[in-house]
Amino acid sequence: LNNWAGVPGQQWKLCYSKSTHGGNSTTFHNNCNNKGETYTVVKSTYGKLYGGYFGQSWRSINNYVFDANSFLFSLTGNTKHPIWRQQYAVYDTDSYGPTFGGGHDLYIDGGMNYGNTYFGWTYECPWCNQCVNGTCQNYLAGSYSGNYIQDVEVFYKDGKGGFGADVWMDLDIDLTEFLGKELQFELYFQTVD
């Protein structure tokens, strides 16, 4: 997941778990709003693991949020699905759980028990670009409608680790004064299992 988001080595903290915090969208928003980018991981009763990455903070604004970096994924299928309608990245309202796309491509109800995956409306289907069909809709959860959710977990960046492009973008070192001289650099990295 970190590689898909462009943040290899990033550590994430749990802000919401249905099995720990109970099935309530208000609790999800109270725990996860204003935390920055998040991963949502869903386990359907069909045994599928899938979810979405949102590159901004949840804020309970009762509207769609534009985000060009969001994507859906299937851990079961090991696939990433980029967004093609960025203006509908997520639907951010207190009365829904994490909800992605204008169809909704991934919808979780307020009780965090039920969901739909009308996949393809906003995020790219693996079989066709910018299309919606039954195969696409069933892909993530096992069935596009009537999905009962076994568990939902939402994670946010904890500020530790990660060497994504955003960390190095402002690195600007002028080495002209050292031209013709020998330099030695030491880099230290902490690895995480």
Image: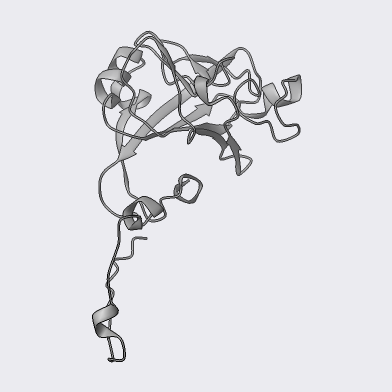
Q: Position of residue 175 (x, y in %)?
A: 28, 77
x and y, in percent, of residue 98 in the image: 43, 21
Please tell me whether residue 44 is drawn above or below residue 23 in the rendered image: below
* Front position in the image: 106 or 65: 65
**Rendering coords of residue 48 (x, y %):** 58, 32
**Viewer-closest of 154 and 90:** 90
Which quarter of the picture shows residue 56? Answer: top left
> Is the residue 39 above or below the residue 93 in the image?
below
Q: Is residue 187 above or below residue 11?
A: below
**Residue displayed at 25% across by 47% down:** 159
Q: Position of residue 81 (x, y in %)?
A: 60, 36
**140 or 125, which is in the foreground?**
125
Query: Which residue is drawn at the image coordinates 48% and 33% (left, top)?
Result: 70
How many numbered discs, if any?
Answer: 0
| Quarter placement of the C terminus | bottom left
- State whether residue 24 appears in this view: no
Residue 31, placed above or below residue 192:
above
Horizontally, residue 47 falls left or right of residue 2, namely right
Q: Quadrant of residue 96?
A: top left
Report the residue at 72% width, 20% height from top.
132
Does any portion of residue 102 appear in the rendered image?
A: yes
**Left or right, 17 with reference to 150:** left
Q: In the displayed structure, does residue 135 sit left or right of residue 73?
A: right
Structure colour scheme? one colour
Residue shown at the point (39%, 54%) measured from the top left = 164
Q: Is residue 145 left or right of residue 149?
A: right
